[in-house]
């Protein structure tokens, strides 16, 4: 499995900050120490260009991120402090998803061991998401291949409002999100298929809703390329996800999605999305588990 990762995905955050940014290098480390290590081909992405990132984001917003020019209101909505390397980190992370998508179109599947920053909007960062990787990659690819049929499968516990906002009007992009209805973001942006679940949904109910809705989706849209915002904040021990999936349920979740991905015959790219396990060291373990499940599935 070709996986994109870069040491600069990590920038230091203040002690006790709720975003576990060390999960990026840690997930790679767990994978490199796993029984699937010999199946990994880890590559470093290039950052997306200014011209590419501004297909989605307003230049004034990006400059404010770079120069510590965000208002305190905007900073609160983003949920991250200023760091001089945050813009560079974001451009690399978006580059990772774009590179993984290009690789997936060539070889069938690839991962960005980052990305899934699905809340970011053109003019503001939201919920720990500075820039929107999937939306930018979609815009870049559609400029090159306007007929490409693209599907977003978002199984992060939170709705993919940024992707829905940016991609909603594009006729050959279909957005699917399965999430807790009464959780963040308070203001949802409707997608093509939203599966809104109750707070603290149990694993069995979640899996039933996931399989049933993906079955419907399979007959509604026929994609060439799928972006999977996987997310591990569906876990029962997550601080913010408000779902009750056990680790075993999460494996079943991955299996249902991977079976769907394979059934479409489309190329697919995996991105990490959110994960905020109460025991911080478990978050990269869960992300690595999803990547390992995908390797086992595609063997
Ligand atoms: Zn989330």
Image (tube, rainbow, N blue to C red):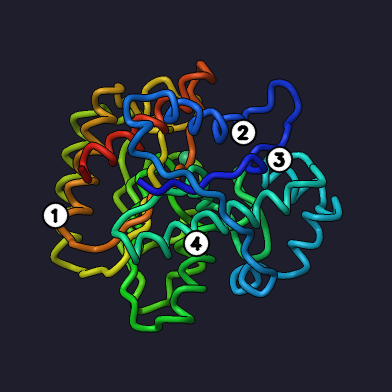
What quarter of the picture does the N terminus occupy? top left
The numbered mark, 3 or 1, whose residue comes first in the sequence reads 3
> Which element is circle 1 on?
helix
| Residue depicted at 14% across the width and 48% down the height | 212
Of labels 2 and 3, the one closer to you:
2
Can residue 184 be seen in this snapshot? yes
Q: Say the numbered circle drawn on residue 80.
A: 3
Most foreground residue, 53 or 79: 53
Q: Earlier in the sequence, mark 2 or mark 3?
A: 2
Name the secondary structure under disc 3.
loop
In which quadrant is the C terminus drawn? top left
**Residue 282's disc number:** none
Q: Around disc 1, counting alpha carbons within 10 Å, would you say few (fewer than 14), some (14 to 19), or many (20 or more)?
A: few
Left-right relation of 133 to 105: right
Report which residue position mark 2 lands on: 21
Q: Earlier in the sequence, mark 2 or mark 4?
A: 2
Please tell me whether mark 2 or mark 1 is closer to you in this view. Answer: 2
The count of marks equals: 4
Above/below status of 81 relative to 168 = above
How far is the residue under mark 2 from the one under mark 1?
A: 34 Å
| Rendered image: mark on residue 98 | 4
Look at the numbered disc 4 and give the secondary structure of its residue: helix
**Circle 4 crowding by C-alpha within 10 Å: few under 14, some 14–19, many from 20:** many
Question: Percent position (x, y) of residue 55?
Answer: 60, 74
Residue assigned mark 1? 215
Mark 4 or 3, which is nearer the eye? 4
**Crowding near the residue tagged with mark 3, few <14, some 14–19, many ≥20 C-alpha atoms within 10 Å:** many
Say if disc 2 is inside 8 Å of ligand 1.
Answer: no
The answer to whether mark 4 and mark 3 are in CB contact below 8 A is: no
């Amino acid at each position: 499995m070709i996986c994109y990762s870069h040491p600069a995905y990590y920038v230091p955050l203040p002690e006790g900050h709720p975003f576990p940014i060390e999960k990026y290098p840690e997930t790679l480390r767990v994978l490199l120490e796993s029984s699937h290590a010999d199946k990994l081909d880890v590559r470093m992405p290039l950052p997306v260009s200014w011209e590419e990132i501004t297909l989605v984001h307003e230049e004034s917003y990006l400059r404010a991120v770079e120069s510590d020019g965000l208002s305190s209101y905007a900073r609160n909505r983003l949920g991250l402090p200023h760091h001089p390397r945050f813009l560079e980190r974001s451009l690399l992370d978006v580059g990772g998803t774009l590179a993984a998508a290009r690789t997936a179109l060539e070889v069938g599947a690839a991962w960005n061991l980052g990305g899934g920053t699905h809340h970011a909007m053109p003019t503001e960062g939201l919920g720990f998401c500075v820039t929107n990787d999937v939306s930018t990659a979609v815009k870049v690819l559609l400029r090159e291949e306007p007929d490409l049929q693209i599907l977003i499968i978002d199984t992060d516990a939170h709705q993919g409002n940024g992707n829905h906002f940016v991609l909603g009007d594009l006729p050959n992009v279909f957005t699917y999100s399965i999430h807790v209805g009464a959780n963040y973001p308070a203001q949802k942006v409707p997608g093509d298929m939203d599966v809104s679940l109750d707070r603290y949904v149990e694993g069995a109910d979640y899996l039933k809703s996931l399989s049933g809705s993906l079955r419907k989706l399979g007959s509604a849209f026929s994609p060439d390329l799928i972006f999977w915002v996987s997310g591990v904040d569906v876990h029962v021990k997550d601080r913010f996800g408000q779902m009750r999936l056990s680790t075993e349920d999460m494996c079943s979740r991955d299996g249902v999605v991977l079976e769907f991905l394979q059934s479409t015959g489309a190329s697919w790219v995996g991105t990490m999305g959110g994960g905020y396990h109460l025991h911080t060291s478990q978050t990269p373990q869960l992300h690595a588990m999803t990547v390992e499940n995908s390797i086992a599935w595609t063997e």
